[in-house]
């Protein structure tokens, strides 16, 4: 069955020294975690993070990758380079990328395909705004984002990737979707995957919830049938908090 993934998205936080200190403190705390533990650090901290995580069961991931392997794309990160330095997981299509950096469903799809073609595992983010939720279009929007992000991706690749459902109104606000509401949307995404591919792919794909996940609500969220992990911002920044998330079942 699906192995849960607890992933931290550090966003634009921490220096290399702070990165090393946090990972050194976290490593012994999550030695017995039953889930896959990932920290997606800023790109400039990846090397420090990898050094500190050596020998532990913390995997270091990236927060984005471009859809070309090389070329005139100032400030972008090549998926081929991420693979070359030993990265496995890369977030694509985070709502902050969509909102502030003009990412579209099309570029999210291109980035996801580029990640897969380099042997990386994309964590594809989808989720509605507060206005969209209040307008009752959450499922329509999430179906559209999921379908667009997976366009041209084979069933085999789809089964190996991760989708993170992150309602925008719950990100960094302290407002979490109730575990039931999050489960409903994650279950809806899974049913869409079954429609797009088949039941085997839907059963295999890991679907995370993200948006104000913290040590208090993690257990309930993780007890839900269709939630296979968390994509965590604020609570992934300290070893004390993130270790409790990775050990949600202890
Ligand atoms: P918070 O956990 O800070 O709400 O952030 C969620 C997020 O955006 C993770 O990608």
Image (spheres, rainbow, N blue to C red):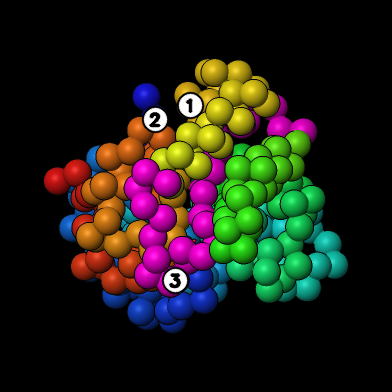
Which residue occupies the extreme top position in the image? 199
Disc 2: CA contacts within 10 A as few (<14), some (14-19) or many (>=20):
few
205 over 69 or under it: above or below:
above
Indicate yes or no whether the magenta region holds residue 119.
no
Query: How far is the residue under mark 1 from the one under mark 3?
Result: 29 Å
Q: Residue at x 35, y 48 (%)?
A: 179
**Residue 17 placement (x, y as % from top left):** 37, 80
For marks 3 and 2, give the CA distance: 27 Å
Disc with the residue nearer the chain's start (1 vs 3) = 3
In the visual, does 121 lie left or right of 99? left
For the residues labelled 2 and 1, say whether their Cβ atoms are less than 8 Å apart: yes
- Rounded to the nearest angstrom, the CA distance separating label 2 from label 1 is 6 Å
The answer to whether mark 3 is within 8 Å of ligand 1 is yes
Q: Quadrant of ligand 1?
A: bottom left
Q: Residue furthest right?
A: 72
* Disc 1 element: helix
Q: Earlier in the sequence, mark 3 or mark 2?
A: 2
Mark 2 residue element? loop
Report the residue marked by disc 1: 204
| Magenta run includes residue 157 | yes
The local secondary structure at tag 3 comes to: loop
The residue beneath circle 2 is 2
Name the residue at 47% across, 66% down. 171
Q: What is the span of residues highlighted in magenta in the rendered image? A: 152-181
Residue 91 x %, y %: 56, 55
Q: Residue furthest left?
A: 250
Residue 199 on image: x %, y %: 54, 18
Considering only vertical position in the picture, is 106 above or below 197?
below
Q: Nearer the viewer, residue 239 or 68?
A: 239
Total numbered labels: 3
The part of the image, by quadrant, that contains residue 16 is bottom left
Mark toward the viewer: 1 or 3: 3
């Amino acid at each position: 069955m699906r192995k849960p993934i607890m992933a931290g998205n550090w966003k634009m936080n921490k220096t290399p020294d702070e990165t090393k200190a946090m990972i050194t403190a976290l490593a012994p705390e999550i030695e017995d975690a039953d889930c896959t533990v990932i920290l997606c650090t800023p790109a400039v901290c990846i090397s420090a993070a990898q050094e500190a995580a050596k020998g532990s069961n913390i995997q270091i991931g990236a927060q984005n990758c471009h859809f070309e392997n090389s070329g005139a794309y100032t400030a972008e990160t090549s998926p081929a380079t991420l693979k070359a330095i030993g990265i496995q997981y890369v977030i694509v299509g985070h709502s902050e990328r969509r909102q502030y950096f003009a990412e579209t469903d099309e570029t999210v799809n291109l980035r996801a395909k580029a990640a897969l073609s380099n042997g990386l595992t994309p964590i594809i983010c989808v989720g509605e705004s507060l206005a969209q939720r209040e307008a009752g279009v959450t499922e329509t929007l999430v179906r559209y984002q999921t379908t667009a992000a997976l366009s041209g991706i084979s069933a085999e690749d789809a089964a190996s990737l991760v989708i993170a459902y992150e309602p925008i109104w719950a990100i960094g606000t302290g407002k979490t979707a109730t575990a039931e509401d999050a489960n409903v949307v994650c279950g809806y995404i899974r049913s869409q995957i079954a429609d797009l591919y088949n039941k085997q792919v839907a059963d295999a794909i890991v679907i995370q919830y993200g948006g104000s996940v913290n040590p208090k609500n993690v257990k309930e969220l993780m007890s839900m049938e269709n939630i296979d992990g968390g994509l965590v911002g604020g609570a992934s920044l300290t070893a004390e908090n993130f270790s409790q998330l990775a050990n949600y079942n202890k």
